[in-house]
Image: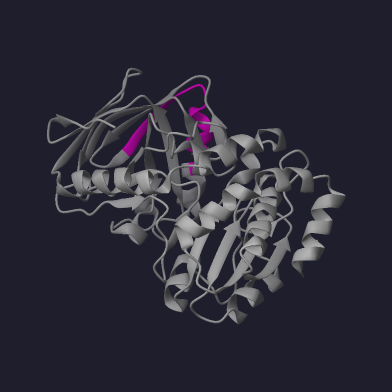
Amino acid sequence: MDKAFTVKEYLRLLEKRSLLKTVKTHYPVFINVLKECLKPKGEEVLIIGDLGYPRKEAAPLLAGCYALAAKNLNLDLKVGIQDPKKKGEKAAAHIEESLLELPPNNIIIALTSNMLGSMVEIKSFRKFTKKRKHKFLSASDLSQLSTKNFPLLVKSIDVDYKEMRKTGNTLKKIFTNAHELHITSPSGTDLYFNVKGMKAKANNGDYQKVGTGGNIPCGETYIPPRGKKVYGKVVIDGSMRTKSGTTLLKSPIKMKIEEGEVVSIKGEKARLLESTLKWAYTKAKHPWGIRRIGEFGLGFNPNADIIGPTVVNEKALGTAHVAIGSNAWFGGSIYAIIHLDQVFRNPKVFADGELICL
């Protein structure tokens, strides 16, 4: 079912699928999100989402929560829904049409079970929103969460956003001013990450300026490395991101990194990540970037946990992550068709030898 909905039509669809009761229970949290994160001032709101899968309906539930919240705030609202899209699949035509028809200086909320899908005119969603001066919120990979665990996702969104901004900006300053980060963990991580001259980003839910946006749930500060100056090992014992989605790990995988590149991957699930990298290498315009480490990030959301979707896992307080692949959109020099966040637990992070305490 690919179509544009009025709010009433979409709510009727949710009721038909026995999802409306859950939406009505949780939507007040999203009133606060809209007020604190976007601070709407009469803008139009376009929600784009998908139908989800049986027993994996976080995307349509989120869309419903945002729709009721926007309605409560008397915002002008449109909803566009498509079938779930996987990597390589095209977005429904009406989705791109609704984006292109939205006048500048408005709000977009994008919620997907996997991803939005490729479009004809819009090659990069982030570049499009920046050019059109839209504010946006997004959440992807939501098919990794069961419908019954939807309250855990809402919990990660129901946070004190003023405190989140304070923490995120403090970490951003520490990362940006550091020359080197040294990361260890009880499971065996021992990684050196040169960041001299690089600028960190704080995903802290502050998307009030036109042309800005990001994930909700929020709660990570992240930074690209200085060239290839990353070396050591990372033991991934939280979640692993591959072409097929996110895997919650019962047994860890170990990545060895030399001169900024993943040179070996070992562990029970290592073949899944290795096969993804091999696939990406054959498809890539810039294959040199496929095995490169593009990011280190530290989670600081006290209400998030490792529950399924990477967009939640990587935000959890008590976790860190490294990403394999592209970082060009946040200040790095790596271009790749992948960006795969690998999450690990209980990190200790030292900035120029000094332990960072949260």
Q: Taking 69 as reference, is 255 left or right?
A: left
Colour scheme in the image? one colour
The quadrant the C terminus occupies is top left
Look at the picture and state if 250 lies above or below 141: above
Q: Nearer the viewer, residue 339 or 258?
A: 339
Where does the image place residue 270, in percent across and percent down from the top left?
48, 28
**Residue shown at 65% from the left, 77% from the top:** 97
Magenta stretch encompasses residue 79: no
Where does the image place residue 91, in percent across and percent down from the top left?
66, 65
Quadrant location of residue 343?
Answer: top left
Magenta stretch encompasses residue 270: yes
**Residue shown at 52% from the left, 42% from the top:** 158
The quadrant the N terminus occupies is bottom right
Can residue 40 be seen here? The reply is yes
First to last magenta residue range: 262-276
Where does the image place residue 95, in percent across and percent down from the top left?
66, 70
Q: Taking 23 as reference, is 230 left or right?
A: left
